[in-house]
Structures are given as C-alpha cells and as structure tokens.
Image (tube, rainbow, N blue to C red):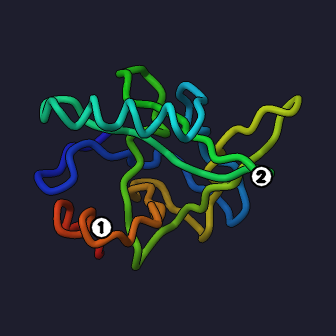
Amino acid sequence: IVVTEEKGRGVITTRSFSPGEFVVEYVGELISGSEARAREAEYNKDPSVGSFMFFFCHGNQRYCVDATEETGKLGRLINHSRLHPNCVVKVIPINGVPHLALFAKTEIPPGEELLYDYGDRGKASLTAHPWLKT
C-alpha cells in the first residue's frame, strides 16, 4: 500500500501479472442500487468518511458493492486511471451471486500501482474529484 497526496492510499504490486490474470476481488457488502444511494447520501454528510461504493448491473438488476468499511481487503484501495488503467473489472457470478473481480489488462511488472477506470463521467463527480479525468 502506498499513500499519495492526490489520491490517498493505493496498491503497488509485489509481483508481475500477465494480461487476463486475476489480480484481486473488490470485496464488500453486496446491496441493491436503491440501498446504495441511501447509504451514499449518509456517507456524504461526513467528509471524514470515504465512499467506496462500486455500482454495477448484473442481469437486469442494479447492484452495489459497498466496501466503505475499513478492512484488510486491497481491492477497495485500487485507484482510478481513465488514461492508463492496467486492470479491468469483470462481474463473476458464483452460485448466482455477483462478485467483482479485477483482472490484469496489460502486463503489470512488480512495483507498479494497480489502476482501473472507475467509469464515472458525471459533471458533478468530475468537478468534485478532478483526478477522475486522468
């Protein structure tokens, strides 16, 4: 784990990953999209609480993995890069339950920061978090 001034914590590799190789799961509580929006509104009331909400669709349903609670799981700490992501997120159903898994998009050498595109292009988000443009 590394700490940067602009993005906070991030994850640096200790070994290499080949394209398509599983890297880490984005672990948290699987909740509905509506429950996630309610939680996000609560989290936004306290600036000291980060929001680690990953919204996605699976089948015909909208879900969210809420990884806001501090744990030892590294997936929640992987930072964003729209321009240079080296990971991609895929929804993997296990016994009918969707899980979020990050896979290497490119060859990733040891010592490189893991990055994926959060996909957030909303004007309000980009204004609040200019680093989402990078």
Residue 112, above or below 127: above
Residue 96, x across and y down, in percent: 86, 33
Does 114 appear above or below 28?
A: below
Determine crowd level at label 2: few under 14, some 14-19, many 20+ residues with C-alpha closer than 10 A: few
Left or right of 13, for residue 94? right
- Where residue 67 sits, quadrant-wise, is top left
Q: Which of marks 1 and 2 is nearer the N terminus?
A: 2
Q: Mark 2 points at which residue?
A: 60
Image quadrant holding the C terminus, namely bottom left
Q: Who's the residue at 66% across and 46% down the image?
A: 101
Q: Name the residue under label 1.
A: 132
The amino acid type found where label 2 is placed reads Asn
Q: Residue at the spot x=60%, y=29% of the render? A: 30
Q: How crowded is mark 1: few (under 14 residues within 10 Å), some or many (20 or more)?
A: many
Choose between 43 and 111: the one closer to the eye: 43
Residue sitting at 55 percent across and 41 percent down?
Answer: 33
| Residue drawn at x 24%, y 65% as measured from the top left | 124
Classify residue 131 as left or right of residue 112. Answer: left
